[in-house]
Amino acid sequence: MSVFIACEADSDFATPASNSSNGTNSSYARILTVGDFLYAVNLNEIVTFDAIDPSDPTEIDRQVIGTGIETIFHHEGILLIGSSEGTFTYTIEASGIPRRRGQFDYNTLDLPVEPCDPVVAAGNVAYATLYTRENNVGICGRDQTINLLVVMDITDLENPSLITTVETPSPRGLAVRGDLLFVCNEFSGLTVYDVSDTSRPRVISTVNDVVAYDVIVKDDVLIVVGGSELIQYDYANPEALIRLSTIDMT
Amino acid sequence: MLIILVLTLAFVGCEELPEARPIPETAFGLLPIYLDSVEGTSITTLPPRGINDGRGFAVLGDTLYIVDQLRGIHIFDNRDPAEPVGVSFISIPGCASIAINGNFLYVNNLTDLVTLDISDPFNAIEVDREPNLYPRPLEFPEGHVGYFACYDSSLGLLAGWESGTIELPQCYIE
């Protein structure tokens, strides 16, 4: 999930050149810096700011995306927008303004109720977690839940397609690095998947004694935040994460 | 999700209508946290403190910025991931998401997008504010099941929800 590996010349959609020092966001981001531009999503729009002067962002564009917009992720000049209705794909034009390319519609998954989700990507594959809260009440009071990891092929940005879905307990934030996918399961901990075969994500290990809401992979360290905790792991051996530190000051 | 004003059935058209609930004298549930318009836009840097409800976060270099849902941002020095050190807490009412560029932190303060200069992490300075980028917070506690005290906009801005004892609770989520 290192955002700026993306500037290589051979990538299809180059990130605009910049001297900016952008931070890396976890998957639940609703505000994003890419080069000299700032992107913010509200419930239904993506708003672009020119932030060449980072102290004074200026709005330059505003587009309606859809409904229930939740997260924004950048990957090699591509913006992925997570929402309750689907994953939307955009490319960043040279002007910094996003151009809509397509969407993967969760209707195709035939879900009983609208899910919430963040989405991340590596290469041509995007991963979204879809969940509904416990005690979620669907139509007419029936209790229905969704707990899915959705794997999508985004090679064709106009027509993202489903690779597979995997049941996973209460999935929240997620991060991908190489063949490893880290999925937060909130009160159920954290699951590490091997996604070398994206059509068959395989559980490598799980950590149960944490509250995991969101995650960033930074170099050799896995950083996990949830509840009152900040926990970091060495994931060199993904079959047995080594806990480096725990901050829990409550 | 079904939100019920206890006295009023707010939902029609389904076969399985829930029964109206009696109003207890007191109940444990959620109460709105109110802010006046001055408090609502007041961003202050405080000493490090415990994380209450950690959500999304961001990393730049060796520094972590952790969103404490609706409360603010915790800054950690993470040069040694085996021993992260709390630096400061920036109190930001309604905070839910952040992004970083160099010494500038972009964050929502209730409905506004605010730019903070964090060159000095002990004294974040507001340098820009884009008003009304975000809708007002939901006037009910999303994800909560049970009684809650109804939000009353005449009492101030809604910053979030806290647990407590409610007298004669009028609102309920099934």
Image (spheres, coloured by chain):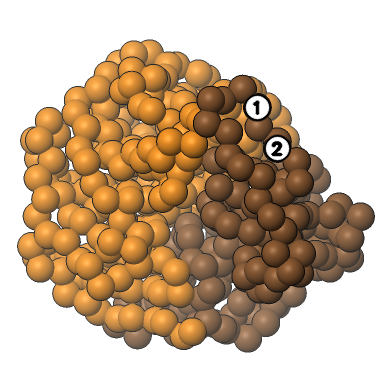
Chain colours: A orange, B brown
Q: Secondary structure at mark 2?
A: loop
Q: Say what amino acid the circle numbered 2 marks.
A: Leu
| Location of residue B85 (image quadrant) | bottom left
Residue appearing at x 12%, y 59% in the figure: A205
Residue B71 at x, y percent in the picture: 64, 67
Q: Amino acid at mark 1?
A: Val
Residue at which label 2 appears: B9
Task: Tell me: residue A152, above or below residue A28.
Answer: above
Quadrant of res B151? bottom right
* Residue visible at 37% across and 78% down in the picture: B79
Regarding residue B165, the answer to whether it shows in the image is yes
Q: Nearer the viewer, residue B172 or B110?
A: B172
Q: Position of residue A103 (x, y in %)?
A: 41, 19
Q: Are marks 1 and 2 in contact (CB under 8 Å)?
A: yes
Residue A209 point in image, percent of width and height = 25, 73
Q: Residues within 10 Å of mark 2 (few under 14, many from 20)?
A: some
Q: Chain of mark 1?
A: B
Q: Is residue A202 above or below residue B25?
A: above
As drawn, the residue found furthest toward the top would be A158
Numbered disc total: 2
Front residue of B23 and A83: B23
